[in-house]
Amino acid sequence: MPELLHSSNDNKKNITQDQQNLTFDCQKLPQEMQQISPQRTTFALEQINKYLGMCLPDMTLAQKKDIMVKSDQMYAQFLTINRTPDQQKAFETYVVDKAQIPNIQQTFFEKLNQRDQYLLRHQGQGYLEIVEANDGHLVYRRSPQYLANIFAPFFPEAEKVFMQELAQQNKEPLLSNNKFKISAQEITRRALFWENYLKHYPNTSYQKDASYLLKFYSTLLFIGTEIQPVSTRYEDNLDIQISNLMEIEALAKHKNSRLADQARKFLTFIAMNEEQREKDIPLSAKVMDTASQSEHDLAVAQLAQFLGLTLFPLSEIEKRNCFNDAICHD
């Protein structure tokens, strides 16, 4: 019996020591994250991510959001690469050719910046991946699943759901050469998701961003963009992109949904003639000055006012970027 008691005391002592070590490591974590540079390895990233999994449960929500910002800075530092123009060209050529011809020669690889050589060998580790940016260039990024997997499980339900859904939506880049790469069906699904999210979690700390995403995808569904308009003059069914029209007609049958209300008003709008629109949707003088330059602009201005939509010029989208990660960034 004395031996068992002694063993129990030793175990308690070891547990206390482990708890003290963990507390000490968690206190050091922000400093360790700041020290991640372009010279560090993916193993160093993975070690920090391992510590995050142990430290996050005991942090306050404010501390979790602060350390999440530090994780953004950590990856930005890690992925900083100063290439020459020739190295940039070699990098993009190599990645494209590698995708098409897996057994591409080693001689091409040796032309790359040494940091690129390292990151390409370790692609997929530490949540690192290569994607095509809107301007067509290939870039490294931290996978949106990073926040969804590392941080979201330790956040309140509303924030957890937000990050996990947005990470899934942003698994693939949304834009390529200013053109959207998703279907009208997916646009509708996303708009409905954010509408329902706001109903279920009205007090979420991501309320503003969820509202932005709802407005954005609603406008994308009913109006489109300058490069990909849903219609030219919104005059009748034949003037509407068929995939968008099918989604809008299906949406109009829903109940207890503002999106459904907008869909029904959209169908009412395209049945109006010019005189009805001018009478029922009077525009301010300021809007008329900018919208009257073309029939399309005038119809868009009237439709936006009639449905209560916010117009999103493509140039404005990246100012509040909600399309590359599991949260939105300025």
Image: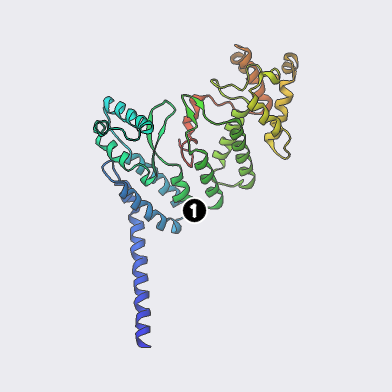
Residue at image coords 49%, 53%: 153
Residue 27 drawn above or below residue 128: below
Q: Is residue 223 left or right of residue 164?
A: right
Drawn side of residue 269 relative to residue 289, left or right: right
> Would residue 281 be found to the left or right of residue 179 on screen?
right
**Quarter of the rendering occupied by the C terminus:** top left
Is residue 167 shown to the viewer in this render? yes
**Residue 302 falls in image quadrant:** top right
Residue ID at (72%, 22%): 269
Residue that lies at the very extreme toward the bottom in this rendered image = 1
Residue at the top extreme, as displayed: 293
How many numbered badges does the structure rendering display? 1
Residue picked out by circle 1: 153
Where in the figure is residue 42, as x and y percent of width and height? 32, 46
Residue 132 at x, y = what percent?
Answer: 42, 31
In the image, 72 versus 140, the foreground residue is 140
Task: Report the quarter where the N terminus lies.
Answer: bottom left
Residue 285 visible in the snapshot: no
On screen, residue 221 versus residue 319, left or right, reads: right
For the point 47% across and 30% down, the residue is 318
Where residue 244 sits in the image (x, y, percent)?
64, 27
Three-letter amino acid code of the residue under disc 1: Pro
Q: Position of residue 109 (x, y in %)?
A: 27, 33
39 w.r.t. 61: above or below = above
Along the line of sight, the residue nearer the viewer: 103 or 285: 103
Secondary structure, mark 1, is: helix
- Residue 196 vs residue 247, the one in the foreground: 247
